[in-house]
Amino acid sequence: RLSDLRGLVRGRLRIAAVTTAEYFVPDLLGPFGALHPGIDIELAVENRDRVIARLHQQVDDLAVMMLPPDDLPLQSLPFMDNPLVVIGPAQHRLARLGHPVPLEELTGERWLMREPGSGTRWVAEKHFASHGFTPRLAMSLGSNEALKHAVGAGLGIGVISALAIGPVGPSGRAHRHSPWVRLPVEGFPILRQWSLVWRTDVPLSPPARQFVSYLEHQGKPSSKAAGPMQ
Ligand code: PGA
């Protein structure tokens, strides 16, 4: 049994995580590393398109992402929620509204989006298209942190994973001086999930098998970041 091997497996575990997963993957790896001191871990953090390219090239043993591609033989293990929310500057007119507004209310807004190739952007665009909504795209940003700061600086509003902003209070803010706030918008949060993904046409290394088993049995943190808003 795999559990009998605990602590005895040696080798390298190569994981690629999409950028938004950087907020929780290290927390999963911490206890795993303590259980398996013989396993060296390499964690690459890239956006969705680049993680998919790495899966094609067989660079990693495992990947953590929201939307596995369908043109590769893959197994995926969904293990955690990934709610996507809308954030705006703290002084935004909708910040204290108390009830969700329809997307059309946000037609005149300047929207900030992650870069092309980001899974967050892909899901947001699909969501907008399915609601017949065309956002005014004011700016693309290459990371969640840059997007958060640009929103906080008043440059516009944007879609981001709730995990990237952490838990918010009833006011939609993480803390009293937070420069951004979660905005109440109908249809949000968009509910997606994180999956651990691996190729079924390549044998899993013993360290990778240990990590799959670890996540199946014990590494299921629940996502509390989404909160009850909307
Ligand atoms: P990303 O992450 O927006 O950083 O690409 C989301 C995903 O693709 O899972």
Image (cartoon, grey):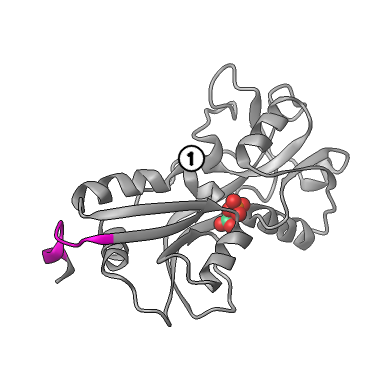
Point out the stretch of residues depicted in magenta: 3-11
Q: Is residue 104 above or below residue 178?
A: below
Q: Quadrant of ligand 1?
A: bottom right
Q: Is residue 77 above or below residue 28?
A: below
* Viewer-closest of 81 and 112: 112
Q: Which residue is mark 1?
A: 225
Q: Could you tell me which residue is drawn at 67 percent across and 51 percent down?
A: 187
- Magenta region includes residue 9: yes
Q: Quadrant of the C terminus?
A: top right
* Viewer-closest of 140 and 123: 140
Q: Is residue 111 left or right of residue 100?
A: right
Q: Is residue 114 left or right of residue 20?
A: right
Q: Position of residue 196 (x, y in %)?
A: 43, 63
Looking at the rendering, which quadrant does residue 160 occupy? top right
Q: Could you tell me which residue is drawn at 78 percent across and 47 percent down?
A: 103
Q: Position of residue 72 (x, y in %)?
A: 54, 78
Q: Could you tell me which residue is drawn at 82 percent across and 41 percent down?
A: 105
Q: Could you tell me which residue is drawn at 65 percent across and 54 percent down?
A: 118
Q: Position of residue 162 (x, y in %)?
A: 55, 42
Let me know if residue 116 appears in the view.
Answer: yes
Q: Quadrant of the N terminus?
A: bottom left
Q: Position of residue 63 (x, y in %)?
A: 46, 62
Amino acid tagged 1: Ala
Element carrying mark 1: loop
Q: Is residue 202 left or right of residue 104?
A: left
Let me know if residue 67 appears in the view.
Answer: no
Q: Is residue 42 above or below residue 147?
A: below
